Image (tube, rainbow, N blue to C red):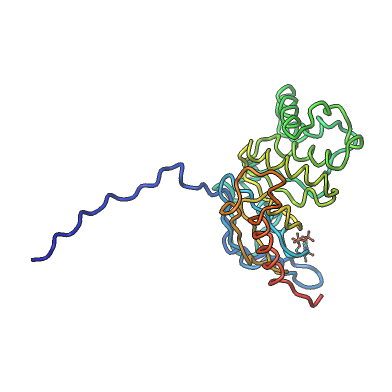
Amino acid sequence: MQAPLPPVPPPQTVPPAAIARTIVDARNVTLTYQTADKPVYALSDVSLKINKGDFISLIGPSGCGKTTLMRTIADLEQPTSGEIIVNGMTPEAARLKRAYGYVFQAPALYPWRSVERNVTLPLEIMGMPAAERQQRARDHLEMVGLAGFEKKFPWQLSGGMQQRVSIARALAFEPDLLLMDEPFGALDEITRDHLNLQLTRLWLQTQKTCIFVTHSIAEAVFLSTRIVVMSPRPGKILDVIDCEQHLPRERTLDIRETPEFAHIAQRVREGLMEGHSYDD
Ligand SMILES: Nc1ncnc2c1ncn2[C@@H]1O[C@H](COP(=O)(O)OP(=O)(O)OP(=O)(O)O)[C@@H](O)[C@H]1O
């Protein structure tokens, strides 16, 4: 006689909180710019899922398509093939619903408007009542450490402070997703360290999902939950490194001295070297 079969275990149910919500889902995205001269192959078959609360850095050689990928997520470029879903919508619907804030390489502030009125500008365009938008601006300026600077003009602030104003402006309409394209690239090392620390605190406090473009390996390792290493143009994803396996979520600058930090930095460096072409 055969032994009785063991009882069938009940189906495994995953608690809803444990299911990571996908904020960006890029599926086989390819993008070719048509120019008068010749086509420029910017992205090739990029697939990437970004979950709520992730801090993703995109790193890769100059011209590999990092900005193009961000602009495609933001609906400022259209993929030639493949698709992107942002917050469960098309990028266009996400843009219209203001699902993301965009911070550019240069602060792009209006010199004739005060700091506060630079932050309130997009809210004004949205038609938000004056008292509410002023409060929003004040709250978000405080969040980036600029309380008391509301009435100053951009030219009265340092480069790092101006970039903080543009972060406050991107945060002011409270998007789930923050896209940052090399926001600290033009700043000196000490200011950059300071802003990295502030940004990581802000991210922990607001629980936003962030996508951050950088050329700095140290900045990518310090800030990210995951680092996406891209190949030279046409940009492909060479490696995705999970930093949270080795580093805690809450970080201070001295984490950069740890062997875990050095280990991740080395893996990023190897990925960049592997994909690098020395022909040009
Ligand atoms: N509108 C456009 N028309 C034609 N080619 C473009 C356009 N925008 C970008 N490119 C080209 O596409 C490629 C990818 O550009 P992209 O700006 O995305 O790269 P990147 O990785 O962000 O570069 P960097 O690190 O130097 O900022 C580059 O060769 C660039 O010259």
Q: Which residue is drawn at 64% across and 44% down?
A: 177
Q: Which of 83 and 13 is in front in this view?
A: 13
Left or right placement of residue 87 versus residue 39 in this view:
left
Q: In the displayed structure, would residue 260 be above or below residue 88?
A: below
Quadrant housing residue 118: top right
Q: Which residue lies furthest to the top in this view?
A: 131
Check the picture and name the quadrant holding the N terminus. bottom left
Quadrant housing residue 117: top right
Q: Residue at x 78, y 40 (%)?
A: 166
Q: Where is residue 273 in the image (x, y as percent from the top left)?
A: 72, 70
Check the picture and name the quadrant holding the C terminus. bottom right
Quadrant housing residue 64: bottom right
Counting every numbered tag in the picture gives 0
Q: In the displayed structure, would residue 268 be above or below residue 88?
A: below
Q: Nearer the viewer, residue 217 or 164?
A: 217
Q: Position of residue 175 (x, y in %)?
A: 65, 39
Q: Which of 111 and 226 is in front in this view?
A: 226
Q: Which residue lies furthest to the bottom in this view?
A: 279
Q: Which residue is drawn at 76% across and 58% down?
A: 215
Q: Where is residue 128 in the image (x, y as percent from the top left)?
A: 70, 28
Q: Position of residue 239 (x, y in %)?
A: 62, 64
Q: Residue furthest left?
A: 1
Q: In the displayed structure, would residue 158 be above or below residue 256?
A: above
Q: Ligand 1 falls in which quarter?
A: bottom right
Left or right placement of residue 157 versus residue 83 in this view:
right
Left or right placement of residue 52 versus residue 131 in this view:
left
